[in-house]
Image (cartoon, coloured by chain):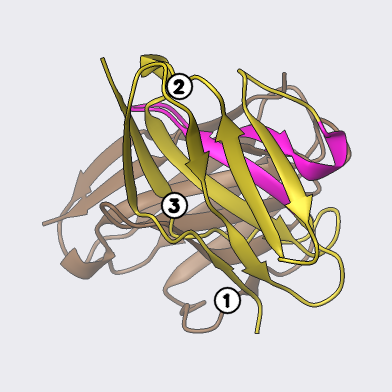
Chain colours: A yellow, B brown
């Protein structure tokens, strides 16, 4: 079965601390993987995608096919990073996205 | 970047009435649009995939006669909640593909439906 798991529904850290949002997936084939973010009162937006191997707003995510994980990391969290984060796999380009339960990140001052 | 709009942003209606929600891609052509439903403090649940000029594909458990989807042009898809009831109250979000990088979907701001 196709499944994505974000084990932490809530994650709270202090400003300047490292943060890691975990994501594990169970998917046939080689899915594309994304992280989407939803800031308070704003629409969902793409944060980063695994094929780009980019760093956005200080966040990175490495795809580990052996562990089927795509954890999101940032070495120094900022208050403006507080948001809901979704790990999202997709089988092929243009196909449906499968949203995980999401992790609500709170960065305290 | 590509922009997706939804109208209305908020609607309150009486039980038994029908409500239409529009999703528009403002500066790109969207061959595929997706409709999601989000309950408070929960994740997005895909309701249906809408392809321009063809019938929508509904997810299991979603009543197609209850949630009518029309995708008549490359920039507009509509979701009509027919004979709405209080349990249909939710946040409805659309997304559209085709306007950005090869794999990107762009999300609308959502529509808050409250059925009294």
Residue A13 x %, y %: 33, 31
Highlighted magenta segment, given as a residue range: A33-53
* B62 in the magenta segment: no
**Residue that carries the numbered disc 2 in the rendered image:** A77
Residue at 55% x, 24% y is: A75
**Which label belongs to residue A102?**
3
Quick one: label 1, few (<14), some, or many (20+) residues within 10 Å?
few
**Residue that carries the numbered disc 1 in the rendered image:** B59
In this rendering, would B79 be left or right of B32? left
Residue at 20% x, 45% y is: B12
In this view, the mark in front (2 or 1): 2
- Secondary structure category for the residue under label 3: loop
Residue A10 x %, y %: 31, 48
CA distance separating discs 1 and 3: 20 Å
Quick one: label 3, few (<14), some, or many (20+) residues within 10 Å?
many
In this view, the mark in front (1 or 3): 3
Which residue is at the front of the view, A15 or B56?
A15
Which residue is at the front of the view, A95 or B27?
A95
Residue A59 x %, y %: 62, 27
Residue B109 x %, y %: 46, 33
Can you name the residue that lies furthest to the left here? B116
Query: What chain letter is assigned to the residue under label 2?
Result: A
Query: What chain letter is assigned to the residue under label 3?
Result: A
């Amino acid at each position: 079965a196709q499944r994505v798991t974000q084990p932490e529904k809530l994650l709270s850290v202090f400003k300047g601390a490292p943060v890691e949002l975990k994501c594990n997936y169970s998917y046939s084939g080689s899915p594309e993987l994304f992280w989407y973010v939803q800031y308070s009162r704003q629409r969902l937006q793409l944060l980063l995608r695994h094929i780009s191997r980019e760093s956005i707003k200080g966040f990175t995510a490495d795809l580990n096919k052996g562990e089927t994980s795509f954890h999101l990391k940032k070495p120094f969290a900022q208050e403006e990073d507080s948001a809901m984060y979704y790990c999202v796999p997709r089988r092929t380009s243009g196909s449906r996205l499968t949203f995980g339960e999401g992790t609500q990140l709170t960065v305290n001052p | 970047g590509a922009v997706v709009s939804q109208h209305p942003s908020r609607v309150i209606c009486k039980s038994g009435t029908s409500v239409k929600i529009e999703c528009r891609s403002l500066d790109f052509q969207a061959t595929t649009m997706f409709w999601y439903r989000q309950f408070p403090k929960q994740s997005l649940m895909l309701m249906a995939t809408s392809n321009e000029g063809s019938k929508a594909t509904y997810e299991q458990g979603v009543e197609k006669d209850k949630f009518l989807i029309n995708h008549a042009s490359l920039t507009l898809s509509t979701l009509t909640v027919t004979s709405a009831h209080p349990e249909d109250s939710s946040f409805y979000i659309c997304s559209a593909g085709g306007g950005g990088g090869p794999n990107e979907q762009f999300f609308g701001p959502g529509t808050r439906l409250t059925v009294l």
